[in-house]
Image (tube, rainbow, N blue to C red):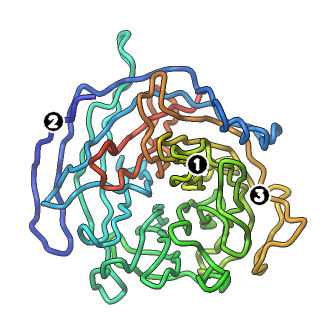
Amino acid sequence: MPSPLLRNHRSNGAAFRFSRTVRAVSSALALAFAPYIAVSGQALAQLSTDTQDLAAPKLKLLAEYRLPTGLRMAGVEFGGISGLDYDPKAGVFWALSDDRAEIAPARFYGLKIDIKAAKAGRPAYVAGVDIFKATAMGTKERKPYAAKSLDPEALRLKPGGGFYWAHERDAKGKPFVGEMGADGINTRSYTLPDYYMPGIGVGVRVNLGFESLTVDKDGAVIVATEQALTQDGPETTPDSGSRARVLKFDPKKGAPIAEYVYPVGPVAATPVPAKSFKTNGLVEMLALPSGGFLAMERSFSVGQGNVVKLFVTDFKGATDVLGQKTLGKGVKTMRKRTVLTLMAGGMLKGVDNLEAMTFGPKVDGKQTLILMSDNNFNPNGQFTQILVFTIE
């Protein structure tokens, strides 16, 4: 796909909080094809865990759009999108960058994605993306976060204003769940069980902490680790999965009220060379209006690329493990069923590091689902990928 043509519009010039509009316009690649993409090779191992009595929504890919790595606004590089939510009243998306305050201040963006409906035989497409605002994040003391003092990964709108958000690790490796205002200032920290704190043989693993956050139909805040806590079992491999923890919070109390286990599938493919880096993890959850969740697992193997899978899952029949420092025998995990598998080939020439997911606006009367990738600020073949699906 050709690189978008970029036009810079405005900047308020503020040092800590900054705002800029960028309009990205290109001949967007409009895609429409069957809702299921074939799974091949070792990825088939994951399908054996499916629970068929879960109702799985059907998705159809409507359009793909890409923003190039290196895109800057107000002199700051855009990218690292790991959390995404949509405000239907304002027609605005809010996107969280996972920059650990190393490239620039920790920040989130306001976006408008211009999705054009199908018309006169022309398929639907994304005409452009407005990055109309960037907000720097700060501590309760209204100070910028120090470099490496946070690892932002998940963001959802909070009723009444502001956001719920989570990060994987502070400078000491401790995870975080809490709230911040619309101005990016942290306002509240939630209480986490002690067994999440990193230590010898216990706690979240480095870079495998809280990647997911959603708000269920009853208003509870749900967060999940990417893979197992250290004491709960090994990381994913091409031959075996891992057991992620899913915490349910009462936002009024800021404390967990339940905890469940999500069965993360195996790595989709053996890396090349075989001893190279590989991973598969639970990178996002999205509550469904009728109950249950969409879960996104992203697998990556050197030499093989990304394979991204969407599942429908819920807590029905799962064991509440809140308070259990180590998962014992007989724990019943959350059930899951495959909705969609995405990999390079066919109509998708590439699948980037998809980590963010939200419902979007309706198009042609159908609800959309938006996926967005974390480009890792890597100019060597990565990009910010936006995929728009309709729920059929």
Count residues near mark 3 (Cα–Cα under 10 Å), then give few for <14, some for 14-19, many for 20+: many
Question: Residue 347, percent across and down?
Answer: 45, 22
Q: How many residues crowd mark 2 within 10 Å: few (<14), some (14–19), many (20+)?
A: few
Image side of residue 224 versus residue 73, left or right: right
Residues at marks 2 and 3, CA–CA distance in whole angstroms? 45 Å
Badge 3 or badge 1: first in the primary sequence: 1
Give the residue displayed 66% in from the left and 72% down from the top: 229
The residue depicted at 29 percent of the width and 28 percent of the height is 28
The numbered disc on residue 315 is: 3
Give the labeled residue for mark 2: 5
Mark 2 secondary-structure assignment: strand
213 or 39: nearer the viewer: 39
Q: Is residue 248 above or below residue 54?
A: below
Q: Earlier in the sequence, mark 1 or mark 2?
A: 2
Judged from the image, the secondary structure of the residue bearing numbered disc 3 is: loop
Amino acid type of the residue tagged 3 in the rendering: Phe
Is the Cβ of the residue at disc 3 closer than 8 Å to that at disc 1? no
Disc 1 residue type (three-letter): Met
- Looking at the image, is 325 positioned above or below residue 120? below
Choose between 258 and 377: the one closer to the eye.
377
The quarter of the picture where the N terminus appears is top left
Disc on res. 249: none
Q: Amino acid at mark 2?
A: Leu
**Which residue position holds label 1?**
296
Q: Is residue 229 above or below residue 279?
A: below
Tell me if label 2 and label 3 are in contact, CB under 8 Å: no
Q: Residue at x 55, y 66 (%)?
A: 208
The x and y percentages for residue 215 are 58, 61
Are the residues at dot 1 and dot 2 in contact (C-beta closer than 8 Å)? no
Which image quarter: residue 226?
A: bottom right
Residue 57: where, in percent of width, then height?
65, 35
The C terminus sits in image quarter: top right
